[in-house]
């Protein structure tokens, strides 16, 4: 069933406890820090009904109902192309890039679906919960976020040997469910419906049973859930000067869990560390795809900003400038190639779904995330120093300064000062603002840190090809052992 934007907004008015800048937020749908991003997410709902788009672009028929394309469990290659097309149309519609709007986090639930047989063997009590929740997300068109990262405290000691709340844990079992305590860092939690909470595999990972091994659904308005948000970027400058900060800031939350009751029907695994470890190792097998796809659009924005600037100033005629633009394009095409190839060579998952080719997808995630800082710097360099010295829009309007700015920012007949100002404001917000710095860190961490990306690739690449090749070429004997040691256990990773 498809939800409307209004139904989504109404769902946020559940009395949830949100704090920002020392202020209790009464209504996230109207608060200035949240309204723009709530509107962007609401548009994702409303666009499903928008007659200007093909009815099958954002939703598909499921019996008498229609469900969102972006939340559909992928079973054939076309499902992945459909998701790509839907995101493409949505970004063009909102004129920006947002990441944590649901389609990028729902994949974690599909990983859980793949793992349900393993989890059921470990502890069969929660067998039906996984299927029920997967169905519920589709039926109710829910906005899911991801709760992985604990504050963790001192990583060198076990959580039990410090303040135990540094990592989320179960404090009590009751007839109704489990009571959990702790905290998680979560983008978009304050304006989402629910989160899939699972552990950071930490210093307890060699134990068989642990109160820290818990996976469940947390409702964002449940009693005891407190959202303590970082400051927003919206409103720090005008929309004319900071167009991205003011529309697409995805506010992050320290979500405190102060003895929160999780009903038994929302629990996926509990106490068995084997289950927790298993889920961690497969977590991003789907969600890495939409995550990397976002970076493709960021790359396009950087190329577009740099290229428009070079066209405005005539620098695009210079060979050395063309080479820098080509470097940016190589980065961009590298992302696209990994994504397209991961669909073309997609693999059946243990649960019967179709997952993007894992080795290619994880290699693409490393390419996209770890090279972003360099490419961002090339774009910044090509935009030149005017990026950070250009006066604000108010100065372009004020009678005392207007004439001077029109004179120095008008380049020729086609490039008048207003377009030059707009391009520089866009590029500044993309490359040089507080928001730009935040987004760069987001890409480096929000799905997992770099060491975790490397571990995922190491764990999914088939080393037998290179080993066999060298064995043959170097004429090694059959005595040599081709077994590859498994990926190191992932500690402190989202
Ligand atoms: C903008 C933003 C949004 C986020 N959104 C979410 C979200 O929605 N949901 C969520 O769950 N989390 C989210 N996170 C949290 C993110 O996943 C964590 O920042 C990440 O897992 C790293 O944890 P940490 O920050 O505690 O760093 P630490 O664990 O302190 O690690 C810091 C650095 O130490 C090194 N290091 C630590 N451990 C190892 C190791 N085992 N091997 C090698 N090197 C290591 C690495 O260089 C690492 O980058 C977000 C983070 C940011 C910045």
Image: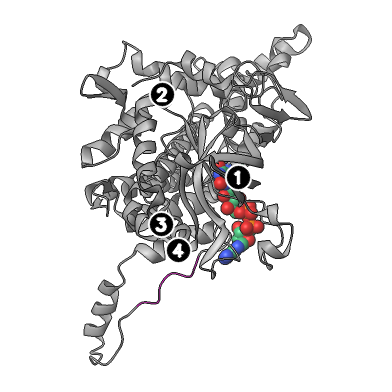
User: Residue visible at 64% across and 54% down?
Assistant: 167
Residue 448 visible in the shown view: no
Query: Which quadrant of the figure contains the N terminus?
Result: top left
- Identify the residue at the far front of this view: 175
Q: Residues under labels 2 and 3: Cα distance?
A: 45 Å
Looking at the image, is 5 positioned above or below residue 323? above
Mark toward the start of the polypeptide (1 vs 4): 1
Residue linked to disc 3: 123
Circle 4: element type: helix
Q: Residues under labels 3 and 1: Cα distance?
A: 19 Å
Residue linked to disc 2: 92
Mark toward the start of the polypeptide (2 vs 1): 2
Residue linked to disc 1: 179
Mark toward the start of the polypeptide (3 vs 1): 3
**Callout 1: few (<14), some (14-19), or many (20+) C-alpha neighbours within 10 Å?**
some
- The reply, left or right, for residue 324 in relation to residue 395 is left
Looking at the image, is 204 positioned above or below residue 127? below
Q: Nearer the viewer, residue 180 or 284?
A: 180
User: Residue visible at 45% across and 40% down?
Assistant: 265
Mark toward the start of the polypeptide (2 vs 3): 2
Range of residues picked out in magenta: 484-489
Circle 1: element type: strand
Mark toward the start of the polypeptide (4 vs 2): 2
- The response on whether ligand 1 sits within 8 Å of label 1 is no
User: Residue visible at 67% across and 28% down?
Assistant: 17
Residue 31 visible in the shown view: yes
**Callout 3: few (<14), some (14-19), or many (20+) C-alpha neighbours within 10 Å?**
some
Q: Residues under labels 1 and 4: Cα distance?
A: 21 Å
Q: Return the x and y of residue 151 as percentages of the image width and height.
A: 67, 51
């Amino acid at each position: 069933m498809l939800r409307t934007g209004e139904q989504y907004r109404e769902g946020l008015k559940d009395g949830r406890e949100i704090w920002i800048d020392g202020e209790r937020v009464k209504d996230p749908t109207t608060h200035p820090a949240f309204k723009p991003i709530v509107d962007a997410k609401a548009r994702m709902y409303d666009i499903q009904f928008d007659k200007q788009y093909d009815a099958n672009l954002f939703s598909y028929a499921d019996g008498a109902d229609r469900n969102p394309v972006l939340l559909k469990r992928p079973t054939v290659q076309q499902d992945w192309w459909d998701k790509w097309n839907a995101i493409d149309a949505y970004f063009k519609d909102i004129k920006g890039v947002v990441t944590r709007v649901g389609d990028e986090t729902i994949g974690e639930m599909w990983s859980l679906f793949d793992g349900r047989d393993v989890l059921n063997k470990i502890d069969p009590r929660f067998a039906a919960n996984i299927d029920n929740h997967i169905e519920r997300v589709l039926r109710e068109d829910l906005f899911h976020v991801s709760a992985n990262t604990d504050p963790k405290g001192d990583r060198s000691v076990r959580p039990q040997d410090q303040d135990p709340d540094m990592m989320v844990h179960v404090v009590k079992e009751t007839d109704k469910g489990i009571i959990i305590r702790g905290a998680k860092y979560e983008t978009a939690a304050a304006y989402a419906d629910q989160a899939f909470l699972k552990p950071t595999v930490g210093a307890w990972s060699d134990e068989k049973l642990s109160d820290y091994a818990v996976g469940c659904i947390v409702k964002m308005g449940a009693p005891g859930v407190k959202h303590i948000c970082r400051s927003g970027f919206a409103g720090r400058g005008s929309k004319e000067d900071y167009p991205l900060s003011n529309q697409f800031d995805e506010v992050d939350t320290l979500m405190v869990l102060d003895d929160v009751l999780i009903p038994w029907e929302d629990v996926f695994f509990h106490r068995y560390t084997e289950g927790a470890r298993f889920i961690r190792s497969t977590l991003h097998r789907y969600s890495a795809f939409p995550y990397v796809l976002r970076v493709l659009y960021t790359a396009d924005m950087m190329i577009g900003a740099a290229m428009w600037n070079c066209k405005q100033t005539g620098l695009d005629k210079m060979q050395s400038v063309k080479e820098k633009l080509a470097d940016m394009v190589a980065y961009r095409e590298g992302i696209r190639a990994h994504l397209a190839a991961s669909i073309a060579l997609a693999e059946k998952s243990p649960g019967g779904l179709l997952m993007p080719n894992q080795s290619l997808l994880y290699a693409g995630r490393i390419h996209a995330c770890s090279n972003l800082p360099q490419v961002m710097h090339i774009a910044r360099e090509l935009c030149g120093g005017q990026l950070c010295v250009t006066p604000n829009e108010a100065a372009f309007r004020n009678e005392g300064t207007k004439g001077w700015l029109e004179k120095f920012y008008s380049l020729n007949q086609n490039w008048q000062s207003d377009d030059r100002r707009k391009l520089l404001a866009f590029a500044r917000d993309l490359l040089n603002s507080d928001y730009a710095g935040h987004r760069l860190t987001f890409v480096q961490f929000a799905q997992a840190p770099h060491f975790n990306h490397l571990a995922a690739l190491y764990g999914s690449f088939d080393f037998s090809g290179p080993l066999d090749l060298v064995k043959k070429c170097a004429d090694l004997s059959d005595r040599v052992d081709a077994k590859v040691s498994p990926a190191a256990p992932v500690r402190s990773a989202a």
